[in-house]
């Protein structure tokens, strides 16, 4: 096991999870992720590699995990930079129109229109067809099925900078 000498480190890790409400739209979430990455990359006290802002679905929120190293050995300075970054994150979330989630449960009172009947029937028909054909990809996808779909998703998505770089090569 490697031994880490804390007195020799030149940076300290900010690791924070920011929870957004489930009402956050995909566009708002993309905006927050882009602006959060810009914030971390532009901050003079944040080491540029690695800078991560990753998204996951949590129990009561859409979670953004922030990972970045602050270039300091001094704990007090680290706390000041972390505070600055967290306040700026609050600002950009407010600018996006999104809001922080609270660990809570929401009770909605109203008429539930239920799932889309046409889409439900189409999904059920697809599963029945897979069963009849013996091709149900559950609990695992066959190597032949995997080979047939491998790499077929447009990634990076069309319209993103990564897609332009990829298309140009």
Image: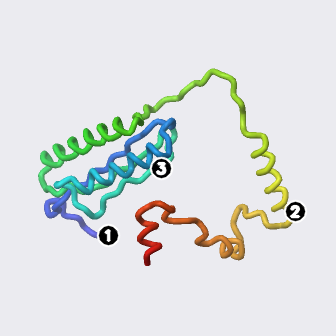
The residue pinned by badge 1 equals 1
Image point 17% across, 54% down: which residue? 45
Going by the image, does 149 lie left or right of 156? Answer: right
Q: Residues within 10 Å of mark 1 (few under 14, many from 20)?
A: few
Q: Residues within 10 Å of mark 3 (few under 14, many from 20)?
A: few
Q: Is residue 89 above or below residue 3?
A: above
Q: Position of residue 75 (x, y in %)?
A: 15, 49
Going from N to C along the chain, the mark reached first, 3 or 2, is 3
Given contact means CB atoms under 8 Å apart, are the residues at marks 1 and 3 in contact? no
Going by the image, does 137 lie left or right of 108? Answer: right
Q: Position of residue 111 (x, y in %)?
A: 69, 24
User: What whole-number distance in Å separates the C-alpha atoms at marks 2 and 1?
Assistant: 53 Å
The residue pinned by badge 2 equals 132
Q: Position of residue 166 (x, y in %)?
A: 45, 72
The residue pinned by badge 3 equals 56
Picture quadrant of residue 160: bottom left
Tag 2 secondary structure: helix
């Amino acid at each position: 096991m490697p031994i880490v000498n804390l007195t020799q480190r030149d940076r300290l890790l900010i690791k924070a999870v920011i929870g957004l409400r489930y009402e956050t739209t995909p566009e708002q979430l993309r905006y927050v992720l882009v602006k959060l990455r810009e914030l971390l990359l532009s901050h003079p006290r944040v080491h540029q590699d690695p800078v991560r802002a990753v998204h996951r679905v949590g129990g009561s929120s859409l979670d953004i995990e922030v990972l970045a190293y602050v270039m300091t050995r001094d704990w007090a300075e680290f706390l000041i930079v972390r505070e600055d970054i967290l306040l700026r994150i609050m600002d950009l979330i407010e600018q996006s129109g999104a809001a922080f989630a609270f660990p809570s449960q929401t009770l909605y009172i109203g008429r539930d229109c239920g799932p889309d009947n046409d889409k439900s029937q189409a999904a059920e028909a697809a599963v029945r067809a897979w069963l009849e054909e013996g091709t149900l990809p559950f609990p695992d996808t066959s190597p032949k099925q995997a080979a047939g779909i491998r790499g077929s998703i447009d990634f990076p998505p069309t319209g993103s900078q990564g897609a332009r770089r990829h298309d140009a090569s």
